[in-house]
Image (cartoon, coloured by chain):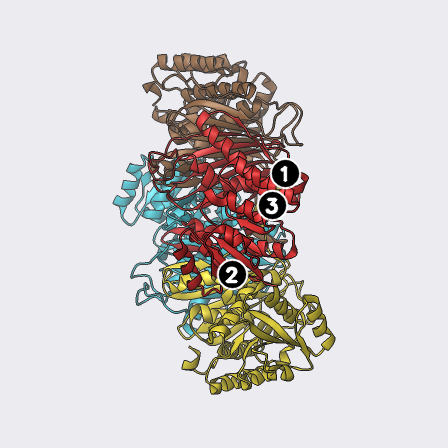
Chain colours: A cyan, B brown, C yellow, D red
Amino acid sequence: MTLKIGVIGTGAIGADHTRRITNTLTGAEVIALTDVNQEQAEKVKQSLGLNATVYKDGHELIEKSGVDAVLVTSWGGTHEEYVLAAIKAGKYVFCEKPLATTAQGCQNIVDAEMAAGKRLVQVGFMRPYDSGYKMLKEAIDSGAIGEPLMIHAAHRNPSVPEMYITPMAIHDTLIHELDVFRWLLDDEYVSAQVVFPRKSKYAHDKVADPQIVMLETKKGTRIDVEVFVNCQYGYDIQCSVVGEEGVVNLPEPQALSMRKNANLGQSILTDWKDRFIESYDVELQDFVNGVQAGKLTGPSSWNGLAAAVSGDACVKAQESGLIEPINLPDRPEFYR
Amino acid sequence: MTLKIGVIGTGAIGADHTRRITNTLTGAEVIALTDVNQEQAEKVKQSLGLNATVYKDGHELIEKSGVDAVLVTSWGGTHEEYVLAAIKAGKYVFCEKPLATTAQGCQNIVDAEMAAGKRLVQVGFMRPYDSGYKMLKEAIDSGAIGEPLMIHAAHRNPSVPEMYITPMAIHDTLIHELDVFRWLLDDEYVSAQVVFPRKSKYAHDKVADPQIVMLETKKGTRIDVEVFVNCQYGYDIQCSVVGEEGVVNLPEPQALSMRKNANLGQSILTDWKDRFIESYDVELQDFVNGVQAGKLTGPSSWNGLAAAVSGDACVKAQESGLIEPINLPDRPEFYR
Amino acid sequence: MTLKIGVIGTGAIGADHTRRITNTLTGAEVIALTDVNQEQAEKVKQSLGLNATVYKDGHELIEKSGVDAVLVTSWGGTHEEYVLAAIKAGKYVFCEKPLATTAQGCQNIVDAEMAAGKRLVQVGFMRPYDSGYKMLKEAIDSGAIGEPLMIHAAHRNPSVPEMYITPMAIHDTLIHELDVFRWLLDDEYVSAQVVFPRKSKYAHDKVADPQIVMLETKKGTRIDVEVFVNCQYGYDIQCSVVGEEGVVNLPEPQALSMRKNANLGQSILTDWKDRFIESYDVELQDFVNGVQAGKLTGPSSWNGLAAAVSGDACVKAQESGLIEPINLPDRPEFYR
Amino acid sequence: MTLKIGVIGTGAIGADHTRRITNTLTGAEVIALTDVNQEQAEKVKQSLGLNATVYKDGHELIEKSGVDAVLVTSWGGTHEEYVLAAIKAGKYVFCEKPLATTAQGCQNIVDAEMAAGKRLVQVGFMRPYDSGYKMLKEAIDSGAIGEPLMIHAAHRNPSVPEMYITPMAIHDTLIHELDVFRWLLDDEYVSAQVVFPRKSKYAHDKVADPQIVMLETKKGTRIDVEVFVNCQYGYDIQCSVVGEEGVVNLPEPQALSMRKNANLGQSILTDWKDRFIESYDVELQDFVNGVQAGKLTGPSSWNGLAAAVSGDACVKAQESGLIEPINLPDRPEFYR
């Protein structure tokens, strides 16, 4: 049975996921679309030749009986509302990050989902679907390096536009690390500290860049993440896990080594969209398969909540200069 | 419209392709199966829950009007017959290597396909679909290293069984290189020479191992390929292209680097099936898309013929110890 | 003219430097030796066939008119006294680290040397003589990565004995980093913080291991150094400098890459003595050449003082858990 | 006792070795010099402030009783004559390559040295003194890769001047490989073949470039060496040894890895003089130490003869296009 999907929000990411479901994935099709800009939704429908209906708004779409599952790819401020509506309608929902714009919003979703009695929500954190992170996770879980004690990481972008301000280093950039480290370590954060190195001359006035975020987990693992969004040279994700008996590193993306002009080199990506491009396919296919099997296993509402709570603490630490506690409630059995 | 595929031969590779079409690829489904062992065909049908008919033989399957395209994954000795039948029926056909067991058999297919007036056949050479080889090809075609002058390559397996004898180093192992170098260089071979280094103590009596095959192309590019099928340490495919201005190397498969036990290392694969596992998906999806679009662009019958003719010359060179000519007719416009 | 050197302390490092001067370096010879254990000094003299006199103590040796320069390789607690005596005698002196066991002791030497009116003292920090660090320094100074903003570093040992306690991670291990980063960055530290990750099960009771030391410099560069002295897998020195336009990494020591047993790997050193073995030669030859030329350019008393002051702050930070200021006086023109 | 050395030929390499002995090495000094251009010899003497006598010719220098050992760094055509004279005078002699310009000349030296009853001659092959090749040799000798079966190698220069013609690819370029492979494998060559790939557009009229030289040894090991002297991108020496159980590669020269401008790269050398710069020091110090100890262990006259005989066969193979035998007499016990 082909899964019938409705897409709420057909901007860049919504259109991309629609194309993905239509042309690349198996087992699903998009039969409903909506967008604040209805013309945009029509345009996506036409360009992909979809046999789909364009609805007036997300609520109407969610309620349609032919829609089996929902993709929420609208503006972040509307996520909470649509996810709650989908849960209420008993429908599976894939929601792009952030799950909600506040920790309370995420908590509301967690509460509603638990009340519904089964996992209905997957959040769009794609790094656990990246082949390199999967290798890291397997190596850690295999015990090959003993217990993990430290993570040294970096998240670097070539540059950011004027609208990118200091707290976005947490909410828009670090958020992926906040999710993926919890998954890698199977652990929760207890505190955050942020320090600001000498500012790059390439950084705009309103962004402190680079930053170093230091996290501590319940088990005592220490994580330092360099966030450097004007590093000029490329889009570069580094992650090194130091265990009691060894160290493993996230693999570099596959690249050709070339000897030329007195250089032995390989290309570094410059566009973030290329870095996890395959992960988006795997992530969404996993959602489709999970819905088909009646059991979601990808990033949950709890992941959304944990990212929101720890992100808030990091922003507070940016402002205070202090070591800020991260107070996440105990993870319910429901989310294990 | 979903492409309806019939599969002739449901052994290891046939079953695997059937699973691939059913669970991983998009746009196609298997609706017909056959095998010399009908129980085996039934078993594949059951295990994948296919809505398919099991036919008594390949000819019956090919002739069924509901079958849009055929996969030939039967025993090599039957390929020619089924491919010719598919062409006669005007149906697209994907044939695993070898296209035919003799150069004449390949020529028969080429002749039949040209008489049919359009490309109907794709041969199962999957390396051009490997992400690493694609990077190599792009680098060469971009002019980044200037004109290619030499290729240094190696094809290494950990070990081979007793039944693997000297000429199989060409027909079963080197055949992939014979295809992929032509594609990388957009060139044809003119001669082959084979030399036999000191034999490994791990090689069985009936196989000279390792071997070094040296090829020359029309444009004068020189290729040396080490074929070493009892190398013990892993399954390892190396390819370095030396151009007038630089050198590019086939990337190693993605692997985690680990520091442990006084070693900074990364795993080498040991099973050939893992090396090109993603390429099989891409290859077969490309066939499906090509059929849907009415235009095949993957490895053609001509590739099958070229591999057979050059393979025969290599085997002759194994026996004679001489530089043997490779006489391939000029490539018809049809196959450009 | 061959430089006549007297060696105070003929234990492991003293004997090694004596061998070095005798067999490897050019332009110097050891003509005087002393040790608290006179038999040990005699033994070194005999084993190397030296034409040298064994003196009863360091002061007698320093005063001998035939001795042009002095090596202080005795027990750390005696360094200050012998270095001051050498300065008083107007003789050049190479002193192994620590220059003195207290910051005040280092200051006393700085004061005496400035009073003497010329640089007479070189401290045994050998990393600036390492070919890899020299490449790093050249890359930074060339402007290739723009202004340095961060350093991420690690100092890992396989294991340490029972007598190694928490503050030794600073005084015996980190001290090399404390010196080399100042040199790399041409900058001084202003604060230190130390955090303690989850402790390795391989660490003894009296040592917190690993530790992460975070330093800030006057220019605002942020440095994080992992000190992990029971890492099990090897002796491993990592240093990555992140600049406004790029990142440079300390090269790995030269090693053979080997493909074997499904691993593509290279050896990691396990003994710290092998890591900087060539640097000791270069360092001591530079001292000999500097004395011959009447101008020392290697690590100075000021370096010894700076390492002592910043080391003390790091130990204080270990104990307090706070960000501790590092108050080093302005560097006198004399030491630029 | 300081070894007193006389230098015959004070051109580039002679002047360089004289500087090396004077400023870098230990245990030797240059006390005699001569050159066809006496002014040049005087100039070297002055610039290094040597306490040395300039003689009118090599024979006069060799006969001087104060001269303990001789360096022959004159024009290649004169090597044989001076080496024979030194042997006759019972003096140790270090001779730059070639030992003689003909195989017969090398044989004359071998005969004279054997008649003299002890090894007096070291030939200036420096690669066995390179740290990377030493690692390769140790790995092979340790049995880590099992018996060596193949070597794949490359010798690449950025470009060569107009005077460099086809046979020089053997006599001036490949000659180092011809020596070092015999040493690595402890084996002798039995045949050579040369093939010419498509010529680079950067190669001058009188040089076929690149070339691939294929050698076979007594034990059956097969070696392929790419010689490419207009490769544009750098001076690059590659050597990969394939054994029964694994593969080892000559390490790349130490280099900084840098992330910049979307490239993760490291520098490749462009000047051959930088590649083995440290080996020259080690090589000549080994000669000095060997003379002092009365026992030479470096590359011998036999190495010079073997290189000449195999080089001649390679040139013959260039011309004939055939597999040419390499007929070296059995190695006398004297040279084991």
Q: For the residue labelled by badge 1, is the local secondary structure a helix, a strand or a loop?
A: loop
At horizontal 46% and vertical 37% (from top left) the residue drawn is: D170
Label 1 is placed on what type of residue?
Answer: Glu
Question: Is B43 above or below relative to C271?
Answer: above
**Residue A18: horizontal and vertical position, in percent?**
37, 41
Q: Which residue is mark 2?
A: D31
Dot 3 falls on a residue whose secondary structure is: helix
Residue C4: % across, % down:
58, 74
The quadrant of the rendering that contains the N terminus of chain D is bottom right
In-front residue for pair B157/C97: C97
Residue C324 seen anywhere in this rendered image of the structure: yes
Q: Read off the residue under disc 1.
A: D245
* Helix, strand or loop under label 2: strand
Amino acid tagged 3: Lys
* Front one among A107 and A199: A199
**Which amino acid type is shown beneath numbered disc 2?**
Ile
Relative side of B215 to B335, left or right:
right
User: Mark 2, chain letter?
Assistant: D
Q: Which callout, 3 or 2, points to the residue nearer the camera? A: 2
- Please state, as top left, top right, bottom left or bottom right, where the C terminus of chain D lies in the image: top right
Pointer 2 local density, CA inside 10 Å: few below 14, some 14–19, many at least 20: many
Q: Position of residue B107 (x, y in %)?
A: 43, 14
Mark found first going from the N terminus, 1 or 3: 3
Residue under label 3: D137
Disc ID at residue D93: none
Mark 1 against mark 3, which lies toward the viewer?
A: 3
Q: Chain of mark 3?
A: D
Sequence-wise first label, 2 or 1 = 2
Q: What's the residue at 56%, 49% (across, down)?
A: D86
The residue furthest left is A39
The answer to whether tags 3 and 2 share a subunit is yes
